[in-house]
Amino acid sequence: MKKKTRLIHGGLFGDEATGAVSTPIYQVSTYKQQGVGVHKGYEYSRTGNPTRFALEELIKDLEGGERGFAFASGMAAITAVMMLFNKGDHILLTDDVYGGTFRVITKVLNRFGLEATFVDTSDLENVKKEIKPNTKAIYLETPTNPLLKISDIEAISGIAKEKGLLTIVDNTFSTPYWQTPIALGANIVLHSATKYIGGHSDVVAGLAVADSAALADELHFVQNSTGGILGPQDSWLLIRGIKTLGVRMEETENNAGKIVDFLQKHPAVTKVYYPGIASHPNHHIAKKQSGGFGGMISFDVGSAEKADQVFSKIKYFTLAESLGAVESLISIPARMTHASIPVERRAELGITEGLIRISVGLEDAEDLIEDLNQALEN
Ligand SMILES: *Cc1c(COP(=O)(O)O)cnc(C)c1O
């Protein structure tokens, strides 16, 4: 089955009982038992719900894993995966991970004795150097946010396997339409489904997929124990969003390519970050492991003042956090999504005051370029 077909025909068919082609929203908390412990596979909706299960089967199929899990947010999914580990375990993470991931690891999970080191995983030598006797997993985000750094999933999961470590990949930016980390050796894939998977700025959700039955059992145990599950309405919205994921990702890719060409030629732009640019340090890896470069572009306009000028003049890009929606969004990482990262650390990472991040939507590329052009003009 090809990718676009799987988006429509993966997972479960709508409703066998009535023939409805859309999965019903099972707005229910509990299920009648024929006798004590005798039931049709569902007992209580924290443990399992048919609408959520349809979504979990679909994301499992798309990522090519053993079992999928749906959570109330990307952070709930990430936190649940971290709860697979024990006090004193150590995790190696990509240094410019999503701000919320950095925060939960360094300000919440540290209280329970989970140790972590953040390194630039786009360089394999850093990964090898930082593995400790108590390291249990390597956690990658690729491409990263907002500098679009690329890590080699296949090479890193090879290093992890040799040492008996798990490889976990936050696949939010690429989606399974462009990148399937399990096929490259990863054990767990994570998503903020709030972004491209939902795709319409109308739902907050998280997904996880495990590559083995043993890992899936552990993750279901955590999901059921801690309870950060996705409700049936939001599960249904994600199933709906996924049906158009292919056309949305293709169109975003087309628009992003044109905007990158424009930004690279503009005199007010000092630097453009995009994995599709041939001079991007890991362009060849992006090309090898992903079918597309995605719709996220960052560019530097040199100063906070110039960035403010762009924000005050721009019309079609909405100033907002988040990404991956049909409408184009614009943000300034240093003051928005990455504000929770300490100033010194932001400077180390290269997240400057003039760095603007855009999430390219599905508007006409000509309108978007015209808009950026007038906003950048002196
Ligand atoms: C948004 C985001 C998250 C967090 O997801 P929420 O749905 O906001 O909880 C995690 N990782 C990445 C890459 C994200 O962009």
Image (cartoon, rainbow, N blue to C red):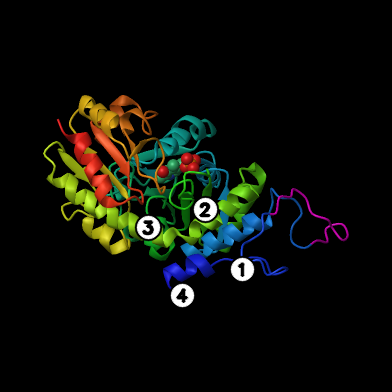
Cα distance, mark 1 to mark 4?
A: 15 Å
Viewer-nearest residue: 315 or 266: 315
| Disc 3 residue lies near ligand 1 with CB under 8 A | no
The residue range painted magenta reads 26-39
Amino acid type assigned to the residue bearing label 3 in the image: Met
- Measured in 3D between alpha carbons, the distance from the residue under mark 2 to the one under mark 4, in whole angstroms, is 22 Å
Residue 180 appears in the rendering: no
Q: Name, please, the residue furthest toward the bottom.
A: 1
- As helix, strand or loop, the secondary structure at mark 1 comes to loop
State the residue position of label 3. 249
- What is the x, y in percent for residue 292? 31, 60
The stretch drawn in magenta includes residue 329: no
- Which three-letter amino acid code belongs to the residue tagged 1? Phe
Question: Which residue in the protein does label 2 denote?
Answer: 208
Tag 4 and tag 3, C-beta contact below 8 Å: no
Q: Earlier in the sequence, mark 3 or mark 2?
A: 2
Identify the image quadrant of residue 300: top left
Q: Quadrant of ligand 1?
A: top left
Identity, as a three-letter code, of the amino acid under mark 4: Met
Residue that numbered label 1 is attached to: 13
Residue contact at pointers 2 and 4, CB within 8 angstroms:
no
Question: In front: 38, or 158?
Answer: 38
Circle number at residue 214: none
